[in-house]
Amino acid sequence: MRIESVELHHLRLSLVHPFETSFGREELKDTLVIEVHGGGLTGWGEAPAHGRPAYSADTVDTCWVALQQYILPAVVGKELGSAQDLQDALVFLRGHAFARAGIETAFQDLLARSRKLPLCVHLGGERRPILAGVSLGIQPTPDLVRRVGEFVSRGYRRVKIKIKPEHDRELLEAVRREHPALMLKADANGAYGLADTRHIETFDEFRLLALEQPFAFDDLVDHATLQARIGTPLALDESLPTLGAARSALRLGSMRVANIKLARMGGHVPSLQLRDLCRGAGVPVFCGGMLETGIGRCHNIALATQPGFTIPGDISESARYYDPDIVDPPIVVDANGTITPRAEPGIGVEVRRDRLEKARVRHAKFP
Ligand code: OSB
Ligand code: MG
């Protein structure tokens, strides 16, 4: 398969609800949608970077430059037999994982469509329902408890809540009181330090599925010290930017669960390699999210159906963030709290060009 041309669509979408984490509050979401053309077919991918380098160094602007200057010249017009071939053509590239994920996911969609297979089957899995999960930002405790209740009544069986110092125990206690059996995760996005160890030890009573990224994005050692002192499994997110970092984390005992994000890892190929590493170490994994549009969301769903993704991830329905989403039909959660990948080839949804163009702030074609 040859990628003949690529289009970049920088979108700015308003979120249905503002999303607040320990790094700030977002009301608008910028993202980069990547459209690849080849063999008479079109594939869609997404680099769901933010407008500012807060979660990682990647922004839509850095993705834009990395794609135009380095990535697209290395892959467009080349005969690439597989997504591994595309990754091999990019071995020179350090970092820029979100941009790499954008082109790789688009190419995987193109390959799946050329094989007339749903993306989940093309990737090596089977088309099976996955448990949905919702990630709820920082907000006053009564609002959060009400929001959890709304999602639970709509069928969601797994909820992740964002926490930070002074905004943790009270929240967890309130949610646990109302939902004793809910699968609950807490994510701190690096807001704590080793000095908070005694406080974090008290979270064991909340029976969390995992406590995600309590310490800094570049730490593995303190996470290992904390993991040895608590019963709650730690899940790493920001601290796993590469396979090498993950190998170190597994060796050190810094986590008992891994959050695998397509954007952070640079596509399906490295995400599945991380799954394999974790499997070898007996560490279960889940698929995380970055507020993706329907395009990235379909890629997340396909990844989450792969063998080894035994912990329910952070994949919610389209309407949680975007109403309307840019894809048709939107992604929905059924009454059992599950999402079923579509049977059509590739991501299985149609990208609505009218909505894409309405949300677009910048557009480029390559070559
Ligand atoms: O830490 O997992 C995170 C969103 C943006 C940046 C970081 C994170 C998140 C989420 C949202 O938790 C997951 C989603 O619903 O897409
Ligand atoms: Mg996280």
Image (cartoon, grey):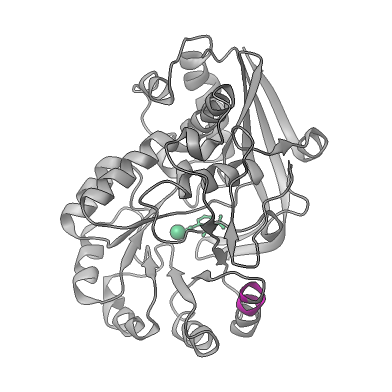
* Residue pictured at 31% horizontal, 74% vertical: 232
In the rendered image of this protein, does residue 165 appear above or below residue 58? below
Which percent across, then down, holds residue 281?
21, 53
Residue 148 is a magenta residue: yes
Q: Position of residue 56 (x, y in %)?
A: 45, 47
| Residue 273: quadrant of the picture | top left
Q: What residue sits 37% from the left and 69% below the top?
A: 210
Q: Is residue 51 visible?
A: no
- The quadrant of the rendering that contains the C terminus is top right
Residue 333 located left or right of residue 131: right
Number of numbered discs on residues: 0
Above or below for 7 versus 48:
above
Is the residue 270 above or below the residue 239 in the image? above
Specify the principal SS of the magenta part.
helix
207 or 357, which lies in front?
207
Q: Residue at x 54, y 24 (%)?
A: 115
As drawn, is 11 to the left or to the right of 75? right
Which residue is at 59% across, 66% downward?
337
Return the residue nearer the eye: 246 or 351. 351
Residue range highlighted in magenta: 147-152
Locate residue 347, reporting x and y percent: 60, 37
